[in-house]
Image: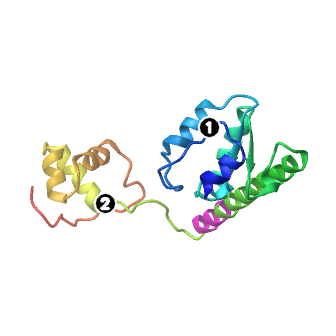
Amino acid sequence: MQLAQLEAAVCERILCEREGGMNDHRRELTRLLRRLRKGDTVIVPALDRLTRGGPFKMLSVLADITSRGATYRSLAEPWADITHELGEVLAALVGYSARKTREDIIRRTSEGRKRAREKGIKFGRKPKLTLDERRVARELCATGKSQRDVAIAFGVSSSTISRICATDNIDQGTKPTNETAPFSV
């Protein structure tokens, strides 16, 4: 049905994508964008045929088309025909709306992170080792134990122990304890 629509629109060249719309590595779309020249018009049966990655992904593809000096036209959505003045205005409004929505999302998430930090919530992965375990690991490395042996004893990677041993002030502000590690090296 889509091929018939494009043939009826008298398209010079028709590219058929075999990949799903959510796939980022779409060979034919990449080929289309690479071949676009100033003055070309990309015609699609419907905008959702261009990409299924949501409005931001679609707008990104549409922006890529127009940045190359080409235009686009959707057979199912006449408002998305930027070969006419009204289509350009509507496309600009849709683009503005998507950009504004994205800015609002970024602002709200930034405010949420700020409030969470003020409440003392820590972000990121939890440390593999407690402060006491880090201290013991550093002490073991300082006594000549290999970082690999210390890593095996704690059940972590050698790079974790390497980072811990390279950090001198990790325990700043903590009280030393007489606790020993529940393992032997």
Q: Position of residue 170 (x, y in %)?
A: 38, 52
Work out whether 178 lies above or below 32.
below
Chain-order first, disc 2 or disc 1: 1
Q: Position of residue 169 (x, y in %)?
A: 38, 48
Q: CA distance from mark 2 to mark 1?
A: 57 Å
Tell me the element at label 2: loop
Quarter of the image for residue 124 reads bottom left
Disc sitting over residue 128 in the figure: 2
Residue 71 seen anywhere in this rendered image of the structure: yes
Q: Is residue 160 left or right of residue 83?
A: left
Sort mark 2 into few (<14), some (14-19) or many (20+) by Cα contacts within 10 Å: few
Q: Residue at x 16, y 51 (%)?
A: 150
Q: How is the image coloured?
A: rainbow
Q: Which stretch did the figure color magenta?
A: 110-118
Residue at the far left in the pictured view: 184
Q: Residue at x 54, y 39 (%)?
A: 30
Quarter of the image for residue 35 reads top right
Disc sitting over residue 13 in the figure: 1
Quarter of the image for residue 78 reads bottom right
Q: Position of residue 156 (x, y in %)?
A: 22, 55
What type is the residue that disc 1 sits on?
Answer: Arg
Question: The C terminus appears in which quarter of the rendering?
Answer: bottom left
Question: The N terminus appears in which quarter of the rendering?
Answer: bottom right
143 is within the stretch colored magenta = no
Work out whether 31 lies above or below 143.
above
Q: Residue at x 30, y 48 (%)?
A: 164
From the viewer's perspective, is the residue at label 2 or at label 1 nearer? 1
Q: Nearer the viewer, residue 70 or 63?
A: 70
